Image (spheres, helix red, strand yellow):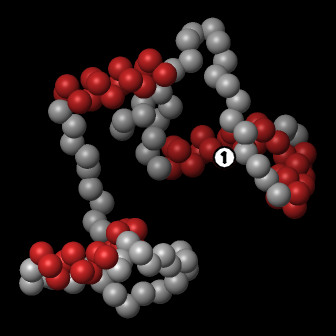
Amino acid sequence: MTHLPENARRSVSIPDFASFDEEAAFWETHDFTEFWDDLPPGRLEASPAMRARVLARLASQATPPGRRPPPLAVDLDPADRAALALLARERGLHPATLVQSWIEERLEEMGRKRGSPIG
């Protein structure tokens, strides 16, 4: 499969195919993610039964009330770690608190709401 850097420009778009064989040959040499930005936004529709199963599975994996979830470890290179520490200190925060606020902001921008994994 072809993998392009995010900043690479491509001149190929998903063509109209004359046959299943032609389409199969195209996808043998291309990766769907190459065309991600060209696709219109969509919405995933789930039946009530599927939604209930997904939510039940997520609930069964959730941390019980009163207990903290296990920490999430992220490896940073020394330069990024130093930059993070400096930014956090300038704001009077612990680096982990700053990172947590960034994650929460980004999830909110992406339309995810805390406690609602299926929006």
Residue furthest out toward the bottom = 11
Residue 80: image location, x then y, percent: 82, 58
Q: Give whichever of 66, 30 is nearer the camera.
A: 30
Q: Position of residue 12 (x, y in %)?
A: 34, 87
**Which is more toward the observer, 38 or 93?**
38
Residue to which mark 1 is pinned: 102
Residue 63 left/right relative to 98: left
Residue depicted at x 79% and y 53%: 76
The residue sitting at 12% across, 75% down in the picture is 20
Asked which quadrant contains residue 94, the reply is top right
Q: Is residue 87 visible?
A: no
Q: Is residue 71 left or right of residue 27?
A: right
- The image shows residue 52, relative to residue 95, as above or below, that is above
Quarter occupied by the C terminus: top left
Residue drawn where x is 36% and y is 77% of the image? 30
* Amino acid type, mark 1: Trp
